[in-house]
């Protein structure tokens, strides 16, 4: 009954691994070499998504796989996203098939819908990559999983979380906090858009439910907290919690998106690896009404967001205060 978590030092993976240990289950974490720290009680297996032999070792005796590893960023080369999220998923899937795992839970993203279409988004909403490498790689990774389901009978299901935040979040806590602290945070469209927040422990609940579900292979569920909290409300609450001033300025997404295109083009033209000042994905995330219908997850998994926004923020802010080095 060994539970393998890839990406066990990441945001979702670390919280999930810790939860599974608390359940009394034997948990194995696949991590790259170096000083990556795993939650207490997790068996460490060093390996890489590029290394099929290490994946085979990690799969020995495993009954359930939670594939949380991958490249998550709003900036990078298409080849890098494809290597990590598509080729990496393919190798993990192949190793799981060879090992005869009982259930494979693939961590996808609600970004596969490309922030385009009728609201609220549902699992059947069209997928659209909008020419953004990260989104394209997540769509392709889902295809890899579904092909394995049909070709090999792999019992795999997929979760599509929306904006995952909480203790340890680099993108939606640490990065925003840094901008708040140095006064560079700018609201998009006045912060009026629903953020589609998904507190990490609620996402972990969904992982456990998906692993235990008798839903047919190939099933997918959108996961978020189902709240109407806006980006403006979230950012103001985070600013207050860390003792920073709220953003003073706002710009319209209609202006920021073409600026992001120009910023990305300039970055690629100069071959820069550092993230440019603006990216299309960041503007889409903050400048789109992120309303998602989670009825399918409620009906088929019994998923119900257990931790409300205020409790989630209290825990997140406590982490931020106790871990100032994570915000620097």
Image (cartoon, rainbow, N blue to C red):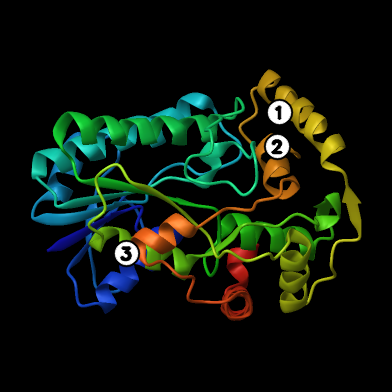
Residue at the spot of label 1: 264
Looking at the rendered structure, the secondary structure element under dot 3 is: helix
Badge 2 vs badge 1, beta-carbon distance below 8 Å: yes
Q: Nearer the viewer, residue 219 or 224?
A: 219
What residue is at 15 percent from the left and 49 percent from the top? 59
**Looking at the image, is mark 2 or mark 3 earlier in the sequence?**
3
Residue 209's tag is 3
Mark 1, other Cα within 10 Å: few <14 / some 14–19 / many ≥20: many
In space, the residues marked 1 and 3 are separated at their CA atoms by: 39 Å
Looking at the rendered structure, the secondary structure element under dot 2 is: loop
**Looking at the image, is mark 2 or mark 1 earlier in the sequence?**
1
Q: Would residue 184 be visible to someone looking at this image?
A: no
What residue is at 20 percent from the left and 77 percent from the top? 24
In space, the residues marked 2 and 1 are separated at their CA atoms by: 6 Å
Indicate the position of residue 236 as horizontal and vertical percent values.
78, 69
Looking at the rendered image, the quarter that the C terminus falls into is bottom right
In-image side of 56 versus 250 (left or right) = left
**Looking at the image, is mark 1 or mark 3 earlier in the sequence?**
3
Residue 262 picture quarter = top right
Residue at the spot of label 2: 279
Indicate the position of residue 325 as horizontal and vertical percent values.
60, 68
């Amino acid at each position: 009954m060994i539970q393998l978590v890839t990406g066990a030092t990441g945001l979702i993976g670390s919280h999930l691994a810790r939860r599974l240990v608390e359940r009394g289950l034997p948990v194995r974490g696949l991590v790259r070499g170096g000083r990556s720290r795993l939650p207490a009680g997790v068996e460490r297996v060093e390996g890489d998504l590029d290394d099929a032999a290490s994946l085979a070792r990690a799969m020995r005796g495993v009954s359930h796989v939670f594939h949380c590893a991958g490249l998550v960023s709003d900036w990078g080369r298409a080849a890098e996203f494809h290597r990590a999220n598509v080729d990496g998923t393919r190798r993990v899937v192949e190793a799981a098939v060879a090992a005869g795992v009982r259930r494979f839970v693939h961590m996808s993203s609600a970004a596969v819908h490309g922030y385009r279409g009728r609201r609220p988004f549902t699992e059947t909403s069209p997928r659209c990559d909008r020419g953004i490498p990260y989104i394209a790689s997540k769509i392709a990774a889902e295809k890899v999983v579904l092909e394995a389901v049909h070709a090999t009978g792999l019992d795999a299901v997929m979760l599509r979380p929306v904006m995952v935040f909480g203790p340890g979040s680099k993108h939606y806590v640490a990065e925003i906090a840094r901008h708040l602290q140095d006064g560079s945070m700018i609201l998009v469209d006045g912060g009026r858009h629903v953020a589609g927040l998904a507190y990490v422990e609620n996402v972990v609940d969904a992982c456990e439910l998906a692993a235990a579900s008798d839903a047919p292979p190939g099933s997918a569920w959108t996961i978020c907290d189902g709240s109407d909290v806006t980006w403006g409300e979230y950012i103001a609450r985070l600013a207050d919690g860390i003792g920073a001033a709220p953003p003073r300025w706002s710009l319209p997404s209609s202006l920021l998106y073409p600026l992001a295109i120009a910023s990305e083009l300039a970055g690629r033209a100069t071959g820069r690896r550092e993230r440019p000042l603006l990216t299309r994905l960041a503007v889409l995330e903050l400048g789109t009404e992120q309303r998602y219908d989670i009825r399918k997850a409620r009906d088929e998994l019994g998923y119900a967001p257990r931790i409300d926004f205020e409790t989630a923020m209290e825990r997140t802010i406590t982490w931020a205060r106790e871990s100032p080095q994570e915000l620097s």
